[in-house]
Amino acid sequence: MPTNKQRRQAAQKRLQRQLERREELAKKRRRNLLVGVTVLAVVAVLSAVFLITGLGGDDAEDTAAAPESTSESPVPAGVVDGSDGTCDFVPDTSGSATLTDVGIPPAEVPTTATTDLTLATSAGDIGLTLDQANAPCASASMAYLAQQGFFDGTPCHRLTSGGLSVLQCGDPSGTGTGGPTYDFPTQVTGSETYPRGTLAMANAGQGTDASQFFLVFADSQLQPDYTVVGTVDEAGLATLDAIAAAGIAGGASDGAPATPVTIESATVAAP
């Protein structure tokens, strides 16, 4: 069992890592980007970029630029990504009016097994299985936010179709710029795919995961830049199919759902 001195030393190291990472993240634009590429055509290569807005930023620059490739490690040196049972949940000190303060999750997180999370929405229930082994920080964050009531009464503000077929939720403000007052490391290997039934985190670049997530209702082509948190159950996929079938406001391929979708409650299954 760690001594009090060892605990203090570990806490000091975590704080130092957080301060270093906060300085690095302060240089990043604060916007959630979800960049998608359409499926390659049989004869010609076609691509398109889809943006899913989030945590603020400079529109002119962000719209033109995609997140960097994940060929190198997305986690800066010294930042803890949860693989050792500890996560760097870094406070966001921007003071943005669209951020909601619900505290910060405990640094120590589970790294084995799964946990179930049910989203009761206005369109029907969506059951999620969080992968604590492969996405410990994201799983712990989603469970924590659900337990704090963070998702309750919040809209799913974006629906896309085509090469990128997702419903995005997790922003209490409904503007695409909201979230909690903390970030945590993106956890990817570079080999991630996003087939139907995937639950993943949206982000503003590596290391800026927060609360916004997306639910994939049809196989989607994306760069492996987004933490895969877990999966959607069959009943949840049926709910997503119904939401997608209702269409997107204005008949667009990217925008608010034509029939508004609200997360009424988010419940973590008892251990």
Image (cartoon, rainbow, N blue to C red):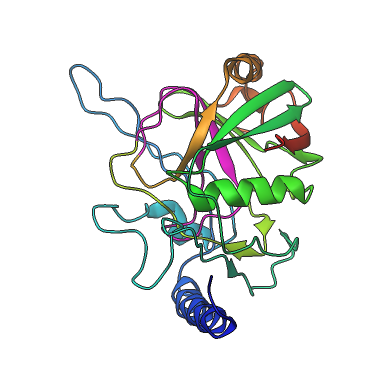
Residue at the image point whose x is 41% and y is 25% from the top: 195
In this rendering, would 22 be left or right of 79?
right
> What span is in magenta?
193-222
Q: Position of residue 165 (x, y in %)?
A: 49, 26
| Magenta residue check for 194 | yes
Residue at the image point whose x is 50% and y is 62% from the top: 86
Is residue 146 in view from this perspective? yes
Most common SS among magenta residues: loop
Image quarter of residue 242? top right
Instruction: In the displayed orientation, state which residue is furthest to the left.
Output: 43
| Magenta residue check for 216 | yes
Question: On screen, 49 above or below 159?
Answer: below
Residue at the image point whose x is 58% and y is 55% from the top: 210
Residue at the image point whose x is 70% and y is 72% from the top: 95
Q: Position of residue 212 (x, y in %)?
A: 60, 47
Is residue 258 in view from this perspective? no
Q: Nearer the viewer, residue 163 or 116?
A: 116
Q: Position of residue 145 (x, y in %)?
A: 70, 50
In this rendering, would 154 be left or right of 51?
right
Query: In the picture, which quadrant includes the C terminus?
Result: top right
Instruction: In the displayed orientation, state which residue is furthest to the front.
Output: 1
Question: On screen, 61 above or below 63?
Answer: below
Q: Nearer the viewer, residue 258 or 54?
A: 54
Count of numbered badges drawn on the protein? 0
Q: Position of residue 251 (x, y in %)?
A: 61, 22
Image quarter of residue 124? top right
